[in-house]
Image: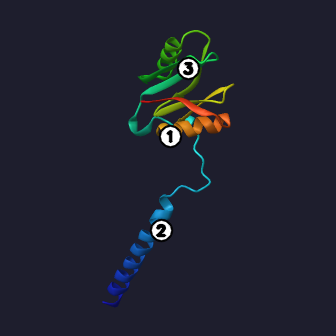
Amino acid sequence: MRNRVLRRGALALGSVIAAVAMPFALAAPASAATDAKQLPPYWGHKKYGSIAVATDGSMGHAVRQKSRTQAEQQALQSCGSHCDIAVTFTLCGAVAHDGDRYHGGAGLDRNQAGHDAMSRLGGGRVVVTACN
Protein backbone atom coordinates (compact mmCIF):
# COMPACT_ATOMS: atom_id res chain seq x y z
CA MET A 1 0.00 0.00 0.00
CA ARG A 2 2.80 2.42 0.90
CA ASN A 3 4.60 1.68 -2.41
CA ARG A 4 1.44 2.44 -4.37
CA VAL A 5 1.06 5.83 -2.63
CA LEU A 6 4.73 6.65 -3.27
CA ARG A 7 4.41 5.70 -6.95
CA ARG A 8 1.32 7.87 -7.38
CA GLY A 9 3.05 10.79 -5.66
CA ALA A 10 6.13 10.42 -7.85
CA LEU A 11 3.96 10.20 -10.96
CA ALA A 12 2.03 13.33 -9.97
CA LEU A 13 5.25 15.23 -9.24
CA GLY A 14 6.72 14.15 -12.59
CA SER A 15 3.60 15.32 -14.41
CA VAL A 16 3.76 18.75 -12.76
CA ILE A 17 7.46 19.13 -13.60
CA ALA A 18 6.82 18.12 -17.22
CA ALA A 19 3.93 20.56 -17.55
CA VAL A 20 6.01 23.42 -16.16
CA ALA A 21 9.06 22.60 -18.30
CA MET A 22 7.18 22.07 -21.58
CA PRO A 23 6.92 25.75 -22.69
CA PHE A 24 10.65 26.19 -22.16
CA ALA A 25 11.51 23.06 -24.11
CA LEU A 26 9.36 24.11 -27.09
CA ALA A 27 10.57 27.72 -27.32
CA ALA A 28 13.47 28.47 -29.69
CA PRO A 29 16.53 30.10 -28.15
CA ALA A 30 16.36 33.88 -28.31
CA SER A 31 19.58 33.99 -30.31
CA ALA A 32 18.37 31.54 -32.96
CA ALA A 33 18.28 33.15 -36.40
CA THR A 34 16.51 31.61 -39.36
CA ASP A 35 17.60 32.50 -42.85
CA ALA A 36 14.17 32.77 -44.44
CA LYS A 37 15.66 32.28 -47.90
CA GLN A 38 16.71 28.79 -46.84
CA LEU A 39 13.34 27.74 -45.46
CA PRO A 40 12.08 24.45 -46.91
CA PRO A 41 8.57 24.24 -48.32
CA TYR A 42 6.35 24.87 -45.29
CA TRP A 43 3.73 22.34 -44.11
CA GLY A 44 3.75 20.49 -47.39
CA HIS A 45 3.48 23.77 -49.32
CA LYS A 46 5.45 22.88 -52.44
CA LYS A 47 4.81 25.93 -54.58
CA TYR A 48 7.54 28.38 -55.50
CA GLY A 49 7.58 32.05 -56.29
CA SER A 50 10.23 34.42 -57.57
CA ILE A 51 10.75 38.15 -58.12
CA ALA A 52 13.03 39.52 -60.85
CA VAL A 53 14.32 43.10 -61.03
CA ALA A 54 16.18 45.17 -63.66
CA THR A 55 18.46 48.10 -62.92
CA ASP A 56 15.97 50.43 -64.65
CA GLY A 57 13.33 49.45 -62.07
CA SER A 58 11.21 47.10 -64.14
CA MET A 59 10.08 44.03 -62.24
CA GLY A 60 8.38 40.73 -62.81
CA HIS A 61 7.18 38.03 -60.50
CA ALA A 62 5.75 34.54 -60.54
CA VAL A 63 3.85 32.66 -57.84
CA ARG A 64 2.43 29.17 -57.32
CA GLN A 65 4.91 27.43 -59.63
CA LYS A 66 5.71 23.73 -59.29
CA SER A 67 9.48 24.21 -59.24
CA ARG A 68 12.07 26.81 -58.38
CA THR A 69 13.26 26.82 -61.99
CA GLN A 70 9.74 27.45 -63.36
CA ALA A 71 9.23 30.32 -60.92
CA GLU A 72 12.51 31.97 -61.87
CA GLN A 73 11.92 31.54 -65.61
CA GLN A 74 8.42 33.03 -65.43
CA ALA A 75 9.61 35.96 -63.29
CA LEU A 76 12.38 36.72 -65.79
CA GLN A 77 9.93 36.51 -68.71
CA SER A 78 7.47 38.89 -67.08
CA CYS A 79 10.26 41.33 -66.15
CA GLY A 80 11.70 41.88 -69.60
CA SER A 81 15.34 42.29 -70.59
CA HIS A 82 18.37 42.86 -68.37
CA CYS A 83 16.63 41.38 -65.31
CA ASP A 84 18.09 39.33 -62.50
CA ILE A 85 16.37 37.18 -59.90
CA ALA A 86 16.22 39.09 -56.62
CA VAL A 87 14.56 36.35 -54.55
CA THR A 88 12.98 32.92 -54.89
CA PHE A 89 10.68 31.75 -52.10
CA THR A 90 8.20 29.15 -50.96
CA LEU A 91 5.92 31.38 -48.86
CA CYS A 92 6.49 35.12 -49.34
CA GLY A 93 9.17 37.23 -50.98
CA ALA A 94 9.92 40.93 -51.13
CA VAL A 95 12.35 43.34 -52.77
CA ALA A 96 13.72 46.47 -51.09
CA HIS A 97 15.31 49.45 -52.87
CA ASP A 98 17.55 52.18 -51.46
CA GLY A 99 17.62 54.45 -54.52
CA ASP A 100 20.66 52.68 -55.94
CA ARG A 101 20.43 48.95 -55.28
CA TYR A 102 17.75 46.26 -55.02
CA HIS A 103 17.83 43.29 -52.65
CA GLY A 104 15.39 40.46 -52.05
CA GLY A 105 14.26 38.73 -48.89
CA ALA A 106 11.87 35.96 -47.92
CA GLY A 107 9.69 35.13 -44.93
CA LEU A 108 6.60 33.48 -43.57
CA ASP A 109 4.43 36.48 -44.53
CA ARG A 110 4.72 39.80 -46.38
CA ASN A 111 5.94 41.70 -43.32
CA GLN A 112 8.71 39.22 -42.54
CA ALA A 113 9.76 39.09 -46.19
CA GLY A 114 9.91 42.89 -46.36
CA HIS A 115 11.89 43.10 -43.14
CA ASP A 116 14.32 40.46 -44.42
CA ALA A 117 14.81 42.35 -47.71
CA MET A 118 15.46 45.67 -45.93
CA SER A 119 17.83 43.99 -43.47
CA ARG A 120 19.84 42.41 -46.27
CA LEU A 121 19.96 45.73 -48.14
CA GLY A 122 20.84 47.68 -45.03
CA GLY A 123 17.88 50.06 -45.27
CA GLY A 124 15.72 51.36 -48.08
CA ARG A 125 12.05 50.61 -48.53
CA VAL A 126 10.04 47.65 -49.76
CA VAL A 127 8.98 48.14 -53.38
CA VAL A 128 7.26 44.81 -54.10
CA THR A 129 6.00 41.75 -52.22
CA ALA A 130 4.48 38.49 -53.42
CA CYS A 131 3.17 35.38 -51.68
CA ASN A 132 2.16 31.90 -52.76
Vertical order, 22 against 17 (above or below): above
Front-most of residues 56 and 83 = 56
| Position of residue 118 measured from the top left corner of the image (x, y, whole percent) | 61, 36
The image's colouring method is: rainbow
Q: Secondary structure at mark 2?
A: helix
Label 1 vs 2, first from the N-terminus: 2
Front-most of residues 38 and 108 = 108
Amino acid beneath label 1: Asn
Front-most of residues 81 and 35 = 81
Which residue is labeled 1 in the image? 111
- Closer to the eye: label 2 or 3: 3
Q: CA distance from mark 3 to mark 1?
A: 19 Å
Q: For this view, does 14 lie left or right of residue 115? A: left
- Closer to the eye: label 1 or 2: 1
The image quadrant that residue 17 belongs to is bottom left
Q: Secondary structure at mark 1?
A: helix
The image quadrant that residue 37 belongs to is top right
Residue depicted at 45% across the width and 71% down the height: 20
Vertical order, 38 against 63 (above or below): below
Is the residue marked by circle 1 packed among few (<14), some (14-19), or many (20+) residues within 10 Å? some
Residue depicted at 46% across the width and 63% down the height: 23
| Position of residue 105 measured from the top left corner of the image (x, y, whole percent) | 57, 33
Task: Single out the residue that lies furthest toward the front.
Answer: 99
Is the residue marked by circle 3 packed among few (<14), some (14-19), or many (20+) residues within 10 Å? many
Which residue is labeled 3 in the image? 52
Is the residue marked by circle 2 packed among few (<14), some (14-19), or many (20+) residues within 10 Å? few
Which residue is labeled 2 in the image? 21
Task: Single out the residue that lies furthest toward the top.
Answer: 81
Label 3 vs 1, first from the N-terminus: 3
Amino acid beneath label 2: Ala
